[in-house]
Image (cartoon, helix red, strand yellow):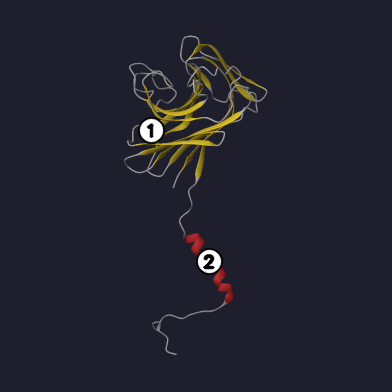
Amino acid sequence: MTSLLPPRFMVFRHPGLAHWGAALLLALAPPLGAAETLLESKFATGAAEGWHPYREPRPATVQVRDGALEVASSTAFRGVFAGLPKRLTLKPGETLKVALRFRLPAYDPSVSAAFRIGFFTHAPGEPEEAGADHGFFLTIGGGPEGPTLALREDRPAPRFDPLSGNTRKLGQARAAASLENGEWHSASLSITAVDDTALALEAVLDGQPLKVSHPTLEPTVFGSLYIGSGNCNARMGLNDIVVTLQTP
């Protein structure tokens, strides 16, 4: 049978070469998406690990007890924040995510959006000026229909007030979790730059997801993570906080 290959090509049928060929293809293939850990707080050392109270006057008290960060206040809209190690701009295909465990020992089922987690453009050390509180956050709370999980945009406001003020609800769902027992729950917030024109947001509470699309790329610059209360006194425990950046 006449070979259809040009004379300069030779076909080898050595069984060992197949393994080398597969290894070569794997080596030349583009790497799968990698996740970079930007922040990890487990409070095992008894220190607050870079977490600070926000909103003067009467900021929340912050202490580490029994291996968790305990936050308490006698004033509404209080909590803690931490800066990301670098200010980042989300590029298409990238996802910024925070996952954590929390508990609400004084949860009031009549208060909506009582617990809040969000990423903001403001970075520690910068002036807390109008417009620096632009970002996205999730809310967990009660209401007449039971616990709810929601995603919101915190738009630039005349004064610096992250997790409150000039907000716009992007989506909401009934939450299956029971929050009144003060037990530990898990939550996460993800922001993905889908392409050059849109963002996708996802909130998860105890495995229950809520996804929304945001047909704009504002904001895509983030420098800090805020965790706090809504229109109620801050009473929360926090642990296992991990922030990652997933790249394509």
Q: Position of residue 212 (x, y in %)?
A: 41, 36
Looking at numbered disc 2 in the image, what kind of residue is underneath it?
Ala
Q: Position of residue 129 (x, y in %)?
A: 36, 18
Q: Position of residue 195 (x, y in %)?
A: 35, 44
The quarter of the picture where residue 5 lies is: bottom left
Give me the residue at 46% from left, 15% from top. 55
Is residue 100 or residue 16 the one in the foreground? 100
What residue is pinned by disc 2?
22
**Where 143 sits versus 22, above or below?**
above
Decide if residue 103 is on the left or right side of residue 222. right
Please state, as top left, top right, bottom left or bottom right, where the N terminus lies in the image: bottom left
The crowding category of the residue bearing disc 1, from other C-alpha atoms within 10 Å (few below 14, some 14 to 19, many at least 20), is some
Decide if residue 230 is on the left or right side of residue 44. left
What residue is pinned by disc 1?
221
Q: Secondary structure at mark 1?
A: strand
The crowding category of the residue bearing disc 2, from other C-alpha atoms within 10 Å (few below 14, some 14 to 19, many at least 20), is few
